[in-house]
Amino acid sequence: MHVDIYKFSKKDDLYVYIARPDYPNDVEELKDWLSVLPKDLRKTLGSACFVMHLDLATSKKLARVDKAEVLEKLHKQGYFVQMPAKEEWERQACLKMKEAQQNKWQ
């Protein structure tokens, strides 16, 4: 299974894998590959930036996620969302809380 991986402007360290089951036969086609994402999710992510193309068949394992889980989601829904590490989420939550508190008192 081939995938394109994207990162997004509004979500640090979050990556979305988009299934490309017809690759390389789909390279001539102009297509919005991110259209498989639910609209509500897509709105929260911000603008997309292509990171890389990957052939999961030749990858033994992935750095931060279970390859079997990724493949299952890709086959089921056409995409997989790789969430940030827990520490990153906690850091982002603290920063947002501080920002909200500062805005409240200004």
Image (tube, rainbow, N blue to C red):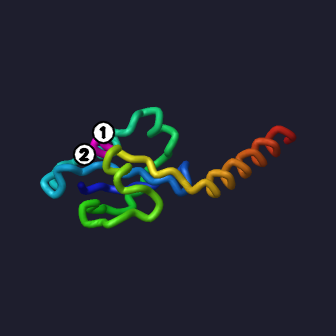
At x 49% / y 45%, what residue is drawn?
46
- The segment highlighted magenta reads 74-78
Residue 68 is left or right of residue 57, and the answer is: right
Mark 2 or 1 closer to N-term? 2
Residue 40 in magenta? Answer: no
At x 47% / y 33%, what residue is drawn?
40
Residue 99 is left or right of residue 65, and the answer is: right
Nearer to me, 30 or 96: 96
Q: Kindly identify which residue carries mark 1.
A: 76
Q: How many marks?
A: 2
Report the amino acid beneath label 1. Lys
Q: Kindly identify which residue carries mark 2.
A: 31
Note whether 56 is above or below 103 in the view shown: below
Report the amino acid beneath label 2. Lys
Note whether 76 is above or below 58 in the view shown: above
Question: Residue 81 at x, y = what percent?
Answer: 43, 47
Question: Residue 59 at x, y = what percent?
Answer: 30, 66
Q: Please tell me whether mark 2 or mark 1 is closer to you in this view.
A: 1
At x 36% / y 56%, what residue is drawn?
67
